[in-house]
Image (cartoon, rainbow, N blue to C red):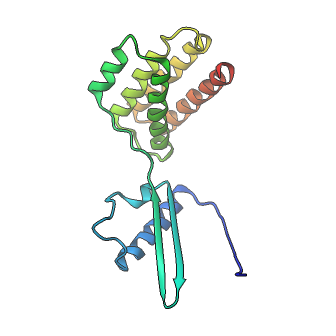
Amino acid sequence: MAFVNKQEFGLTFGETDSLVSEIVELLKKHHVFDEGYPGRDLVEAEKVKLSFRKKEDVSKVKLQLQFPEKFEYNPKSERELLENPKLKYSKLKKMMKKSYAELCRAVQDDILPPADLVGNFINQSAKMVTYGGRGDEHYDRYSDACFNFKQAYDDGDQEKMKAALARVQKIKKECHEHYK
């Protein structure tokens, strides 16, 4: 039986990006990428699996990449959906989950989120608080937190954006614990 030595360790986002960039450069140097290369920056990958398997005198290299689902904001379709009085709460929540995840990812990585994404989240939040019986007692605090986030965004203040999103997350968690 073969000896297996599996190691796991934690890295910061910056260290991870650096490591992945070095691996990518090595793979490019050895012509691993061909015409089928996905064309995305590999440091965007959420999950990278790299394996080597020796067979006789040749090594087989397997690279598996998993990218986060990119949120494509379409202002026209978004506006139409939000203005639709028959928009189901569950559909709105799915939309919010995607835009909130993108927003958090950008802010956590110290990247100013695109204005469309911020507007999208703010509009979705404004629509959500119009649904009665789904956490009404949290809606005012939630709306205030969203307003504070928007102000911090307009000011370009990353630290205030992080703090406001943390407050949004706290209120969201309290509401979901009560209503799920």
Residue 172: percent from left, percent from top? 59, 25
Q: How many labels were placed on the picture?
A: 0
Foreground: 94 or 173? 94
Quarter of the figure with the C terminus: top right
Up the image or down, 24 lies above or below 75; here it is below
Up the image or down, 166 lies above or below 141; here it is below
Up the image or down, 38 lies above or below 56; here it is above
Q: What residue appears at the point 38 percent right and 10 percent down from the top-left corner?
A: 85
Foreground: 140 or 148? 140
In the picture as drawn, the residue positioned furthest to the bottom comes out as 57
Residue 52: percent from left, percent from top? 52, 77
Drawn side of residue 114 relative to residue 45, left or right = left
Q: What residue appears at the point 39 percent right and 30 percent down from the top-left corner?
A: 118
Q: What residue appears at the point 49 percent right and 32 percent down from the top-left corner?
A: 97
Q: What residue appears at the point 43 percent right and 16 percent down from the top-left corner?
A: 127
Residue 113: percent from left, percent from top? 39, 39
Drawn side of residue 54 relative to residue 84, left or right = right
Drawn side of residue 132 relative to residue 123, left or right = right
- On the image, which quarter does residue 77 sit in? top left
Foreground: 67 or 15? 67
Foreground: 1 or 14? 1
Residue 38: percent from left, percent from top? 33, 59
Quarter of the figure with the N terminus: bottom right
- On the image, which quarter does residue 112 sit in? top left
